[in-house]
Image: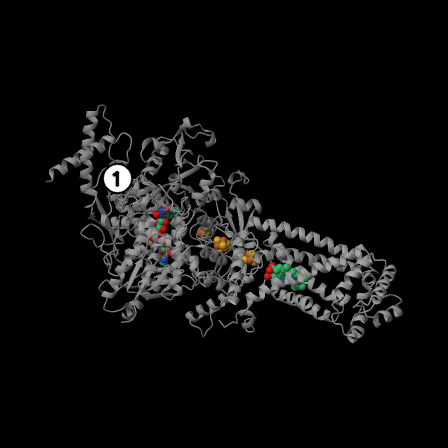
Amino acid sequence: MARQRVMVVGGGLAGLSAAMKLAELGIDVDVMSLTPVKRSHSVCAQGGINSCSDQTRQAGDSEWKHFDDTVYGGDFLQHQPPVKEMAYWAPKIINLMDRLGVTFNRTTEGFIDRRRFGGTLYKRTAFAGATTGQQLLYALDEQVRRWEVAGKVRKYEHWDFLGPVLDNHGVCRGCVGQDLVSMEIRAFPADAVLIASGGCGLLYGRSTNSVMCTGSAVSRCFQAGAKYANGEFIQVHPTAVPGADKLRLMSESARGEGGRVWVPRTPQDPRNPRDIPESERYYFLEERYPQYGNLVPRDIATREIFDICINEGLSVEKGRQCVYLDLTHIPRQELDRKLGGILEIYEKFQGVDPRVTPMKIFPAVHYSMGGLWVDYDRTADGGLRSASPTNMVTNLPGLYALGECNYQYHGANRLGANSLLSCIFDGLFAAPGLEVWLSSRATAAAEAPASLFESEVRRQQACQQELIRRPAGGENPYLLHQTLGEVMTKAATVVRRNPQLRDALREVEELAARAKRCALADTGQWTNQNLVFTRALLDMFPLAQTILRGALARDECRGAHYKPEFAMPHLTGETTAQRRAEADAWCTRFDENNRRWLKSTVAVWQPREESVQLSYEDVDTSLIPPRPRLYGLVGAALIEEVWNQRVTAQLARVP
Amino acid sequence: MERRPVAASTDCRPFLARNEFLIRRLHSLTGLIPVGAFMTVHLATNASVLDGPATFQRAVYQIHSLGRLLPVVEWAFIFLPILFHGLLGLVIIRGGMVNTGSYPLIGNIRYVLQRATGVIALVFILCHVFHMHGWFHSELWLERVVEPLGGGRFRPFSAPSTLGAAMQGGLVIPALYAVGLVACVYHLANGLWTMGITWGVWAGPQAQRRANWICGTAGVVLGILALSALYGAMTVDVPRAVEIEDALYEARVTAHKLAPNERKRADAERTGRGGSRVE
Amino acid sequence: MAENHREGEAAKTFDVRILRQAGPGQASYWERHRVSYEPDMNVISVLQKIAAHPRTADGQDVTPVAWDCNCLEEVCGSCTMVINGRVRQACSALVDRLLEQHPDEIELRPASTFPVVRDLVVDRGRLFQALKKVTAWVAVDGYYDRGEGPPQSQEEQEQLYPLSHCMSCGCCLEACPQYARVELTRGVDESPEEFVQRQAETYDRLFLGPHAISQVILFNSHPTGRHMSSLRLDALIAEGGIQLCGNAQNCVAVCPKDIPLTTSIARAGRAATVHALRKWFDV
Ligand SMILES: Cc1cc2nc3c(=O)[nH]c(=O)nc-3n(C[C@H](O)[C@H](O)[C@H](O)COP(=O)(O)OP(=O)(O)OC[C@H]3O[C@@H](n4cnc5c(N)ncnc54)[C@H](O)[C@@H]3O)c2cc1C
Ligand code: HEM
Ligand code: SF4
Ligand code: SF4
Ligand code: FES
């Protein structure tokens, strides 16, 4: 048999960890990326990466608790075995990254320092200043360069993945890519293709994501028949800074290091925030969630900010959702050591020193919990079978999805500092399974009939020709993208309402139709960014539709998906007895809702109708049963009490 | 698309290329030892003329006590190292570029000045050695070539007077000397500082700043020394200097510290002043 | 900031002069675009506006300008270009500040030490090749679990962390007077692989640049990375090595990540000399 090769699409943390592990296993790897891999979006990650550690263990933490926090944070929407496996791998991953030279911050004695992140009570997050993603990515980039020198890895940087090549059994035998410099389109026979192409923030126009996060690679797989799950779960980060081109994140680590969120009690108080006395500040997160304080999960923090700004009118700037994020009480030296990276960003782009003046921050679209649907191989004790080719494979055999672009770990809401973990875990864990997959193949993709690849290349060339030949004066792709962003941001972010979603769907369909008439301003065959962007734009519509359809169909509130119409009530009764009755009804409704909605949304693209078909799939919650997700909200203690009584009673009934 | 040769100099490279590091370190080293060290001593010796012709003449006798070895020493420890450093310097200059237009940063300006002063120094030193010394001790060369061209003006046994004579009679020569000297001094002082980085003596920004003061001070001191020497040479009272030289000469001959020297006497007779070259 | 830039004028515009080039080997030319002012703009958002409406100031329709960017927050190193004569990241070049320095006009050029691919896009392959040359990685045994990494003091971490920030943007190389431009073209009789090989060999003979020297210090200071010190120092004293630095210190002045490059250069210079002496006299 000819030598087998694996194609990794994407050189972020997920792609690179897979590439290096595959190379270690002796497998030849190609890595394709839009940017030089060292410039992948993972560099932007700031705050850190989670694992329990010897120190948190002594405070009562464990891998199980990390697992529990993750599924609780995700509102139980994730299949639990992969999450469990990831949590148990986490300490090993930190150790490995440490050995690879990641410059994690250290304690005085020389241990890896940890900080607290949202949705947990433990200081679990390892960090390298406020540029953790950059440091992790560089360590992996270095290892992959090492394998490149050793001849095991070939890089195709500045290449655009145009789609998988499937044989007539539906097995993925490679992919087609385009050189973004010479615009050459060619096929890459591969015995497995790993999609590790990250998120799709650009669907929302401006977000905290990098400009390459168009979701194009994922969409092309989706349009080729891969399933897409939980699309409607889009994380809006509570703390970012708006700019003309991007919403720049101010990491959760700012709050992890003691940053406090507040608004003046007087609406739009014109005073300098430094001059507003303590008594006139409303630390609303701390007051509403005394236990978690500023570190409630992101969906909750964002909704509270929405509530404070829109419903209570306390926004710092009128008509926007702006609150203060205050670090000024923390010693300057400590800030520089632990948060230097983000403070510099704020200073550079806002021209204000956040060590002296509280930052003005706004919510921003940040992360897609949804992604390509992938499978896993469950062991009896609820973990993942290692070296199983079933892990992380999409519904198309030979096509795998890793990192942010799959849907596996974060359910309805991702906890901060869990994504870097899931990306690296995916890469490391998938590789041995791929080795098994390769050895199970009878023939190498390189031996597959050339016509298989040629016809796909010709199809892509024809698509491109069609784009280039369009008459001038058509729609402007950049303006369409802007409109798409506005539509998506209005309808499918923090608060969602069915009429708005319906309107948005219609608008997106219209935009998709208009996009078919896009004209290129550049019809050349050399570094044609206009063409590449337009093609990515065209591929945004199927994902946008998936998000909107999923959101429209899901009539409940779960994690980042919030519809006021279906929100669970607060307890309003006068007497304890009344409130207890309400709590009881609450719990019953909660149970019923879970029976109906604790399901993954699975979307399939209908190429002929150019529309999305949804179905629902049960979630494996066999390890940790779902429970109300209240994070100690003031006034909701009774619900938890009632719930716990019910659980105890239920357990008593089981012999 | 055609096959284009890479860098013009690749072909003749192997030896230079293989030893690029060694050669560059030698270049750096020769800048200080022996060239910089010699220059410092040389300037100090010459500045001694301020103390009177006798002091200077004695200092010159000191140097010339090497006798027959002197040419060997001159070439091995002074001329060849300077030529090595200087010519290699020209090669190095070709490998860099000037971008102070875009980056008018102090370090960058100094980088350019280091190169400019190097070139000035090279021209100056070539001329200066010709003007005073004549490069080779061969009689024929000196009489037929050097002296007719106005070079070889210095006579070790009549040091102050010949030096003075060479520097007097017009401001052009002293002005050129001033430029050359300042260039050399800047080049040495700044070179000392960059050398400290090249060899890793001062690494951090603070250390480099401190070193900057030290090198700067050394430069100012050297500069004062150099200009004093020039001033001293320009203000030598030549006739008086001749008397003193002659007296010193006679005293040395009488004390058998010096063999009577034909040229010295002949020169004295011919010109009515002192002046002779040692063999 | 936005407030003090001639507030109140309606529909303000400013000009952007861009040095364009259709491809390698083609002539470059200046093109002027007029952009309407908005608050909080940076050079990337200006280029985005131009891409959306590729029309010159005198009303001619042109192809959109090509440029590189990704993170838009100065961590990925993509968007290096020469803005108003000085190399920097376009994403952090705020229009308000630029107009304060040069009212009404912003000038954009591609980095000049790298071959132009198109317009503002340059090929920085040489910069990455240098990382290969200096073995810029920690050669761990493998990616299996082997427990924690070597212990490190807070002080050590604080030494290494700044060095590991290098985002390979190439600003230092653009400003370095010792880093001369080379542009190779593929020969007609040359396969892409051969060309890549020849490129790598050529780059290896030329100055590797301050960023790579600094990486040597980073990895030679790491408790495990240090095991390969002599390999890295070999690279530093090979052709194109540290000896080519002329101490102009432009690199450190323009590095957007404030990497202490000249400190690294001095330390590397010392280590390289000791290494060379040891090689000659010890083995
Ligand atoms: C500002 C910010 C801060 C964050 N901070 C944290 C944090 O502190 N902790 C945490 O855990 N998570 C954090 N996250 C989330 C986390 O950074 C990302 O989820 C994660 O880095 C994604 O990595 P990835 O490997 O999946 O993909 P990416 O790093 O996004 O890489 C995608 C790769 O795919 C390539 N690619 C994409 N499309 C194509 C195509 N069509 N053809 C070829 N190649 C393609 C790209 O070139 C790139 O190499 C943060 C995210 C943001 C936006
Ligand atoms: C008066 C005699 C000279 C003295 C005392 C002298 C001294 C020095 C010193 C100490 C250095 C620093 C070396 C380093 O940075 O590593 C230096 C560098 C240099 N010198 Fe000279 N030099 C002299 C003449 C010349 C001449 C004649 C030239 C050639 C034109 C020249 C060209 C250079 C150059 C180009 C450098 C920089 C080398 C580098 O950056 O690597 N120098 N010199
Ligand atoms: S110090 Fe060296 S590397 Fe830095 S700019 Fe100057 S010559 Fe270049
Ligand atoms: S050292 Fe600084 S300027 Fe040079 S490539 Fe790295 S980050 Fe850019
Ligand atoms: S776009 Fe990443 S550095 Fe500017």
**Spot occupied by residue A463 in the image (x, y as percentages of width and height):** 34, 61
Q: In this view, does C173 lie to the left or right of A78?
A: right
Residue B113 in view of the camera: yes
Q: Where residue A185 sits: x, y (%)?
A: 37, 65
Report whether residue B104 is seen.
Answer: no
- Say whether residue C256 is left or right of residue A622: right
Is residue A228 or residue A3 the one in the foreground? A3
Task: Give the answer, above or below, for where C194 lies relative to C220.
Answer: below
Identify the residue at the far left of this view. A655
Chain name for mark 1: A
Q: Position of residue C151 (x, y in %)?
A: 39, 50
Rendering quarter of residue B49: bottom right
Is the residue marked 1 within 8 Å of ligand 1, measured from its CB? Answer: no
Q: In this view, does A63 lie to the left or right of B104?
A: left
Of all residues shown, which one is farthest toward the bottom?
Answer: B140
- The mark tally for this picture is 1
Viewer-closest of B136 and A375:
B136
Q: Quarter of the image containing the C terminus of chain A? A: top left
Residue kind at label 1, given as amino acid type: Cys
Local SS, label 1 = loop
Residue that label 1 marks: A557
Which color mode does the image show? Answer: one colour
- For the point 49% across and 66% down, the residue is C204
Quadrant for the N terminus of chain A, please: bottom left
Pointer 1: residues within 10 angstroms few (<14), some, or many (20+)? Answer: many
Residue B186 locus on image (x, y percent): 67, 56
Q: Residue at x 44, y 34 (%)?
A: A329
User: Which residue is farthest front?
Assistant: B255
- Residue A652 relative to residue A564: left or right: left
If the picture is divided into quarters, which one holds ligand 2? bottom right
